[in-house]
Amino acid sequence: MPKPVSPVLFLRALALLLIVLLAASTRSRAQDGEDPAAEDDRKKAKVVNVADKDARDALERFEREFDTEDIDFRLEALGRLRRVIHPDVSERLLDLAFKHADTAIRGAAFRGLAFQKPSAKIIGPRVARVLREEAEVSLKKKRRGDFGLVVNPRTGEVDTESPEGQAALRVKRDRGRMLAEAVRVLYHLDYRDRYSVETLEAFLDDGNDELVALVLELFGIWKEWTVLPEIRDLWEMYPYEDRFETGSVKVDTGSAGTEDQRAARSKWMAKYGDPDKRRPRPKVTQAIKRVVPAITGEEIKEPDELREFLTRSDVKRKIKR
């Protein structure tokens, strides 16, 4: 006759089983392209509007906890504040998102604004304006061949080894993460203005996968035909999830000697030099494959098919600006 199972052992086995199931669920969400942390954030943020007094209490607690030099404690304080849905909280988050010196703090504040739906009419236009300003900065730098990284003058390649090179790379990546959170605000608040397409198009050139994927998703939701040529160029760089391609550029400066060669090299580096872009980007490729059919209504599965599709006279009329 088998021995009865000890209640203690049974409870331990049950707890272990629950842990395994939870871990499997988290892995599954991550494999499906979903950020488990973001999903948890969304669940915690689904809070009914709090009363004015509760908002004041939350803000007072936040200011006490935020008054520290420790970035982790500051981010934890922001994480608690963004669960509180109230116009006064929205204003504090807007202030941090627009004015704080630390890019990580700005990104966390933008993430909180995505949940402040009752204040969407105030938040949407202001976040869109900030994104427009950031896009203008990006475009100006691109025109002069500055892609925000240090180039080794001896090799002509991006310097990722010196302290200066590594610092520049960190700054670029932090900015990409912050911009992704700002675009997420437009996504969650369903906001668009007459400048949004032109603004977001500038970010397709970024090396942050989350930022590019979010921009693509918005273009798909808006069914924005005019950006299809830019999406085609991006798809040709990342035709498959495990591959990437770089191309060539042509420049005619009208100058003699090696001026054209130097200008072409500068232009090539501005387009392809970012090490975050010179790698397979499955998240970007997957987003393109979802968005192109969403915009066109056609089952286009390859970049060559999109290139051919864009030569049709009826399509040319739709993509004309």
Image: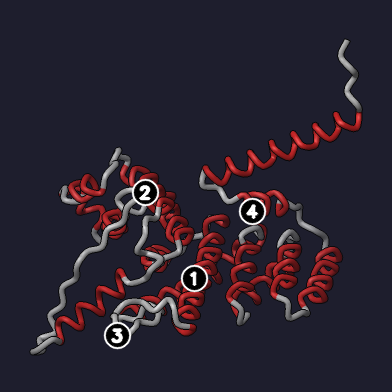
Q: Residues within 10 Å of mark 4 (few under 14, many from 20)?
A: few
Instruction: State which quarter of the image contains the C terminus.
Output: bottom left
Q: Nearer the viewer, residue 179 or 84?
A: 179
| Secondary structure of the residue carrying numbered label 2 | loop
Residue 154 is tagged as 3
Q: CA distance from mark 3 to mark 2?
A: 33 Å
Could you tell me which residue is drawn at 71 percent across and 63 percent down? Answer: 79
Check disc 4 and give the amino acid type. Answer: Ala
Lower position in the chain sequence, tag 2 or tag 4: 4
Q: Which mark is residue 241?
A: 2
Q: Amino acid at mark 1?
A: Arg
Q: Residue at x 69, y 36 (%)?
A: 21
Q: Which mark is residue 37?
A: 4
Residue 136 drawn above or below residue 83: below
| Closest to the observer, 165 or 3 | 3
Residue placed under numbered mark 1 in the picture: 173
Q: In the drawing, does residue 99 fall left or right of residue 274? A: right
Residue drawn at 10 percent across, 86 percent down: 254
Label 2 is placed on what type of residue?
A: Glu
Crowding around mark 1 (Cα neighbors within 10 Å: few <14, some 14 to 19, many 20+) is some
Q: SS at mark 1?
A: helix
Residue 265 position, x and y percent, is 22, 78
Kindly state the secondary structure of the residue where label 4 is placed: helix
